[in-house]
Image (cartoon, rainbow, N blue to C red):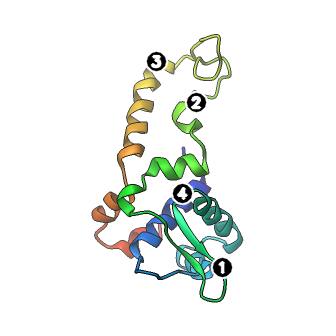
Amino acid sequence: MLSNTCKYAIRAVIYLAVNEEEGKRIGIKHISKELDIPTPFLGKILQSLAKQKLLKSTKGPHGGFSIGKKPEDITLYDIVSIIDGEDVFTNCLIGLHSCKTNNQEGHACPVHDQYSSIRKQMTEFFKTESISKIMTNMEDKSHYIKL
């Protein structure tokens, strides 16, 4: 359901939150190696998150990335909205252009009514699941981050 790019973004934000220290920046190469994500690809992802103030970015020899907000103030919804857009929370499950979630005429796809409640639950979950909650639920943080 989520793109790989979005999954990488979520993992990177969790990694930065777990490794947060006051004033500490983590270099892109280090993050890339730790999370096994290609550096140029990760750089684009992190810059997108930094533009939206979820992360802080500092250039230079001692530069890198750090968390831009408190982990309890960053939700999965925030990250998904930036990387994949809000379509995942609003569009038709099977991608029919005739579905009333996609057009003004109001024609629903065959699974619209059944999926509607699931979509609402999913949206609520993503809006309430914070990075802080995820960190609290992680027993062995390094194991989860490497997924």
Nearer to us of marks 4 and 1 is 1
In the drawing, does residue 28 fall left or right of residue 55?
Answer: right
Work out which quarter of the rendered image holds the N terminus and state it. Answer: top right
* Residue at mark 2 to residue at mark 1: CA–CA distance: 38 Å
Q: Secondary structure at mark 1?
A: loop
Q: From the viewer's perspective, is residue 20 above or below residue 87?
A: below
Label 2 environment density (alpha carbons within 10 Å; few <14, some 14–19, many ≥20): some
Query: Between marks 4 and 3, how big is the CA–CA gap?
Result: 28 Å
State the separation of the CA atoms marked 2 and 3: 13 Å
Say which residue appears at 36% left-offset and 72% top-offset. Answer: 141
Q: Dot 2: what SS?
A: loop
Q: State which tag comes first along the sequence, 4 or 3.
A: 4
Question: Which mark, by number, is residue 70?
Answer: none
Disc number lying in front (1 or 3):
1
The dot on residue 7 is: 4
Q: Name the spot of residue 81 as percent of width and height, x first.
A: 55, 46
Q: Quadrant of residue 103?
A: top right
Q: Are marks 4 and 2 in contact (CB under 8 Å)?
A: no
Q: Do callouts 1 and 3 mark residues in contact (Cβ within 8 Å)?
A: no
Query: Is 112 placed left or right of 47 in the picture?
Result: left
Q: CA distance from mark 4 to mark 1?
A: 25 Å
| 43 to the left or right of 119 | right
Residue 87: x and y, percent? 59, 36
Please say whether residue 31 is visible from this viewpoint: yes
Q: Nearer the viewer, residue 137 or 71?
A: 71
* Residue topped by disc 2: 91
Question: Quick one: 17 or 6, which is closer to the camera?
Answer: 17
Dot 3: element = helix
Task: Please report contact status of discs 4 and 3: CB closer than 8 Å, yes or no.
Answer: no
Q: On the image, numbered disc 3 is attached to which residue? A: 113
Amino acid beneath label 3: Asp
Distance (Cα) linking label 1 and label 3: 49 Å
